Amino acid sequence: MIYLALCSAFGVVTALVARAKGTSWLMWGLIGAVFPVLGLAGVLLFRRETEELRRPCPGCGRLCMIYDALCTRCGTELNFPELAIESSADAARRAHPAT
């Protein structure tokens, strides 16, 4: 019974951390519940989606993550760009500087 409570607690904490990082909270919550310590360590080491560089799709103009190989809107194959656009987190910090 204590083990199930511990797994549930780790699942909830892992899901909350994943949600704060902008990734799938449901997937990480399940991983955290099945593998309590490893799941939490994995989500803490996982990258933040909002801090990744972006690039425009040459076909439709949609902003895609720099590591994407295909545009999810039009299916255009994306080559690695020479220039990248700042991440959404950097754009938000620049738009609303801390006082």
Image (cartoon, rainbow, N blue to C red):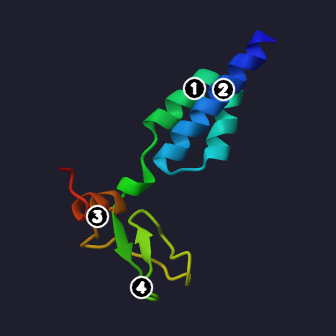
Residue closer to the observer: 23 or 81? 23
Q: Are marks 2 and 3 in contact (CB under 8 Å)?
A: no
State which tag comes first along the sequence, 1 or 4. 1
Q: Residue at x 31, y 73 (%)?
A: 81
> How far apart are the alpha carbons under marks 4 and 3?
18 Å
Amino acid type, residue under disc 4 in the picture: Gly
Q: Are marks 2 and 1 in contact (CB under 8 Å)?
A: yes
**Relative to residue 19, is residue 55 depicted above or below?**
below
Q: In which quarter of the view is residue 3 placed?
A: top right
* Label 2 sits on residue: 35
Residue 74 in percent (x, y) is at 55, 84
Dot label at residue 91: 3
Q: Quadrant of the N terminus?
A: top right
Residue 60 in percent (x, y) is at 46, 88
Q: Is label 2 or label 3 in front? A: 3
Q: Residue at x 28, y 65 (%)?
A: 86
**Left or right: where 58 falls relative to 34:** left
Residue 90 in percent (x, y) is at 28, 59
Amino acid type, residue under disc 3 in the picture: Ala
Amino acid type, residue under disc 2 in the picture: Phe
Q: Are marks 2 and 4 in contact (CB under 8 Å)?
A: no
Residue 44 in percent (x, y) is at 46, 34
Amino acid type, residue under disc 1 in the picture: Leu
**Relative to residue 17, is residue 40 depicted above or below?**
above
Q: Is label 1 or label 3 in front? A: 3
- Label 4 sits on a secondary structure element that is loop
Q: In which quarter of the view is residue 9 placed?
A: top right
* Label 1 sits on residue: 38
State which tag comes first along the sequence, 4 or 3. 4
Dot label at residue 54: none
Outermost residue to the left: 99
Q: Residue at x 42, y 46 (%)?
A: 47
